[in-house]
Each structure stands twice: as C-alpha cells, then as structure tokens.
Image: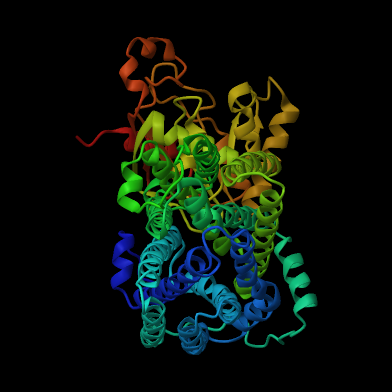
Amino acid sequence: MDSKTRNQFSLLTQRRFGPFFATQFLGAFNDNVFKNALLILIAFQVVGVGSSDSNTSINLAAGIFILPFFLFSASAGQLADKYEKSFLIRLIKLFEISIMICAAVGLYLRSVPFLIGVLFLMGTQSALFGPVKYGILPQLLGDDELIGGNGLVGMGTFMAILLGTMAGGLLVGIPDGGTIAVGMIVVTVACMGYWVSRSIPPVPTVDPSLKVNWNALTETWRIIQFTRQSRTVFLSVIGISWFWFFGATYLAQFPNFTRVVLHGNEQVVTLLLALFSVGVGVGSLFCERLSGRMVELGLVPFGSIGLTVFGIDIFFAVPDAGAGELVGAIQFLQAPGSWRVSADVILIGLFGGFYVVPLYALVQQRSKASHRSRIIAGNNVLNALFMLMSAVMAISVLAAGLSIPELFLLTAVLNGLVAIYIYTVVPEFLMRFIVWILIHTVYRIRKEGLERIPERGPAILACNHVSYVDALVIAGCVRRPIRFVMYHKIFQIPLLRFVFRTAGAIPIASRKENPELLERAFEQIADSLQKGQLVCIFPEGRITRDGALNVFRPGLERIVQRNPVPVIPIALRGLADSLFARGSGRSLRNFPWLLWAEIALIIGMPVAPEAATAGGVREAVAGLLQDPE
C-alpha cells in the first residue's frame, strides 16, 4: 500500500485500487441503466408526449432519489469510520442485488409508483456507499496519488454513466420486451459488482470505539458542525454541493429539453447524457496532468468559469426545431445548430470535471482521518440538500412559465455569482488559479528534485532571486504550502499583492529601512518553523540585475541559529530574461518567448542546520545553476 506509481493508469492493475474501481464502475453503470430507463419511461412511454405531468414527475423522481441522503448519510458515515470498509462495501453490494431484483419486477409490471419506490431504495444504497467510497480512497492511495485516483474514479463514474444511460435508453425503447431486458441487465450487473468487491483489500478501521448515534437529525447536525471546523474543507464541501445543484438542474431537464425544445426522441436524450458524461470523464482524467500530481485548487476557478460560459451559451445555441415528428440522434446532428448545443454540453461536463475533482481530493486530504467518512457523509447530506433545492427551483421556475433554456441560463448566472462569493470568502482558490495560469501559460517548467522537499515538518527553502514572480513559480510546483519571505516593496506590487497576502507571505526590510518590520519578520519566520511549516527565503536580499548570483546575506544564519532546521537549496533557471525580471524591457523585443518560455526549478540536497552557512548554501545554489549540458 505504500508503493507509489508514476502513472495513474497503472493503479488500475493493482489490487489496492483495481477491484475498488471496478466495483464503483459497475455500481454507477447499474444505477444509470435503471434511472435513465425510468426517466424515459416517464417522459415518453407512460405519461405521454403531450402530458403536462412530465416535468413534475421527472423532478419528483429526482427528489425521491436524494431523500435517503438526508435520512441515512449520518449513520453511513459513522459505520464507515467504525467498521472495516471493504466488508461494508460487500454488504452494500448484497443490498444492491436485492434492490435490482425489485427493479426487475417493477419494470416487468411497468408500474411507475412501484419503480419510484425502488428509486428510493437505490438512493438509500448510494447514501450508504458514498462515505465508504470516498473514505477508503485515502487509505488505499498515497497523498500524491489522490488526484490521479479521484480522477480515475471520476472518469470511471461518468463513463459508467455514459454506458449506463446509453444501455438504459436503448433497451427500454425496444418494443415488446425492453423493460424485461433492462431488468435482466441490472440484476446481472449487481451480482458482478458483488463478485468483484470480494477482491478489495481490507483497510484498518479508523475509529473502532465509536458509539453509533442512530438519531439521524442530531447526528447530521453534529457532523455538519464538525465539518465547519475547517473553513477550507467546509467551503470545499459547499463548492461540491453547488456542482451537484448545477449538474442536477441540467441533467434532470434533458429528457424534456430534448422532447419539447430540441424535438428529439429517446436517442437524442441518450446522446446528450453521453456527451455530458464524456466531458466530465475527460475533465476528471486530465486533472492529474494539469495539476502536476498535487491537489491544485487553481483548477476550481478555471472549471467554474467554463461552467458559466458554456451554461450561458447553451441558451443562445438552442436551434429552432419547429414541430412535427420527433427526430433521432442522426437527424438531430444533421440539423442546423445541433453541433453547438452538443459542444456546449460536452464542455460543461469537461469544466465540471476540472471543478469538482480537486475539491473532492482536498476534502479527503485535509480531513482528520478518524472523522473523514463522517465529513464525507456531511458532504453527501449537503449535496442532497442542494439537489433537492435544484428540483424545487426547477419545478417552480418551469411552473412560473419560464422555458427550460431560460432555466439553464438562470442556473449559469447563479453559478457565476456563487463562484464570485466563494472566491471572495476563500481567496486561496483565486490565488491558486492565478499561480496555475502563470505556470501553465507563460512558462514551461522543468522540475527536478521535488521529492527532496519533506512531506511534513519544518524546513527552510533558500532560492536565488531572479524575478518578481519567483515565489509564484515555486508555490505552483511544490505540493506543500509555503510561507515566503520577500522584500516589502515587492510584497506591495499592486498586481501581485493579493496573491502574496493570501499565501501568507512575510514582508521584510533591511535594518536601515525599517528595523521594526525586520524584527517582526524574524518573529514570524520563527513562529512558522516552530509550527512545522515550510519557509522560503531569498538570501540575496534583492532581485539580480544581470542574472548573476549575488552574495547571500547573514540573515539565513540567524534564522537557522534560532530554529535549527534543514536548509534546502533551490535554483531557478531561465527567468533572468523573462517579462517579470528586473531588466524585462529588453525581453519585450523578443516577443515569442512570452508564451511557454522554458524555465527550470532545481531542488538540491538538504543542508544540515549545523552546516548551513550563508556561503555554503550559496555554493550549493550556484552548483544547481550550472547546466550539466
């Protein structure tokens, strides 16, 4: 379990992840075969094309599915923290088999009330599985595998949604026997899921002495209050819940959006759901590559921008379908404007993946291990609340006379307002976005020696000072949070001040300029190191004018004498001629470098505190600056 992998796909071949992934995939596939078959049954075959009950019935079904999350998530979180999780997964899969047998009976009878009751049981099973699913991942994977693992789970889940929605939609549309075929499929897949789950390796119980509180109301309130103890975790949970509000609003309307607005049949519903699923899957999968194997919060604003832009565009992209017979997928794609609608749907999914995967990984990483499953249960409760609010809003807005495209537009505008609020309350998200944009658009960064940064515990990072964005480049490459010590005039640069302040940078001045600020900076440095944090200093004291390495000042030795911690030399190459260097005027005449300029971040071997003299550390940095070629 301690072994690491450099390729996220190789996790699929390992027993610590592969059986879990397959179990999750088969469960998600099964859910969506049944749910899509039921929705299409309501929208097209039972209620009738012209019925005014279709909107209400579909949104009621969505509400019935999420009701169990309110009733059972608190108990599920406690059980996941108290008992061994692979054992719980197998019990839940046995429960799924019994549910799918009931589903097969309901489909054979074509009884919508009975099937909605089965949907409630499916929601119960999902409520029980959620805390176990996201709680076991950090126990199966290392910290640097969380993004990759969550990305694979996200990709697998939405590929299962894709295949499940396609299978459910196509099978239920078969004349004289489609519902029976769906019933046979869901029972068979549930049995396969249980068989695969038997190979999931056991993991240690995190809190075996926990006394389970079966009162759903009081325990739910207690879990949510515990989740609020960490501001970043709680707001990440709110961000995840908003994603489900946004997604549920769009997905629940697709059947009627297709029938009433696009004038398409069941094939077009399946096509749109498939496009959305492919988008989320690809976005989830790309998260590891875009984040560099770290929990990169900068992707969250990037994702929310895309959700808003393409959510608004789908309102303007809706073609004039006219009236007449409902068309299939091929005829729809041949119609004017259909490709723009299709592109909007897949891009909403893509940016949704960018948005939600880092948030899930952040909640897993920053939650206390003994309470992680209960925090995830609290997340599920809030997810359900937001999805219920989505259903209520959709029913109310549509009943008030707005069209489905107008509902989409309203939701996209709300998404922009919520994003602005969250990034105002937690500027860390926006700060990380600015850093991420910098290191993925302006520069191509080669990184060496990142494994020499300790995963925990205090250390001093000592780097050469080449440009105004040195701190941003380092922060974007190193997985752990860093407190930077920087010259107070750089700290006050208007464009960068927000980023530096949000990152907790420590402004410093010379004794001649401001002795009080200098002493305050040394106190903050000492306090940070005592708390086990990383502190990065630029011992030259100023940005180089010619790219050459200046003399290191003795302040480094004063810091180490007070806090004897390792000093890690760092060298930045290639920034001396960049736009953000002190002599950047000359570089403006060489415009092509502006996009994807190649730079390097080289991290050397740690220097023991007793050997960390200013001259010795400078020599180590100088050695790193030498290009071996």
Q: Is residue 58 visible?
A: yes
Residue 593 position in % (x across, y down): 33, 21
166 versus 20 height, above or below? above
Q: Residue at x 43, y 50 (%)?
A: 606
Residue placed farthest to the right in the image?
218
Q: Which quarter shows the C terminus?
A: top left
Q: Residue at x 67, y 39 (%)?
A: 417
User: Foreground: 397 or 420?
Assistant: 397
Above/below status of 254 relative to 115: above
Q: Nearer the viewer, residue 519 or 614?
A: 519
Say left or right for 335 vs 380. left
Residue beneath the point at 49% across and 45% down:
299
Q: Quadrant of the N terminus?
A: bottom left
Q: How is the image coloured?
A: rainbow
Q: Position of residue 256 (x, y in %)?
A: 53, 55
Residue at the location (62% across, 87% down)? 208
Give the x, y percent position of residue 513.
69, 20
**Extreme-left residue of the structure:** 629
Q: Position of residue 95 (x, y in %)?
A: 52, 88
Q: Is residue 297 above or below residue 469?
A: below
Q: Is residue 462 visible?
A: no
Residue 52 vertical placement versus 408 (above, below): below
User: Which quadrant of the figure has residue 328?
Assistant: bottom left
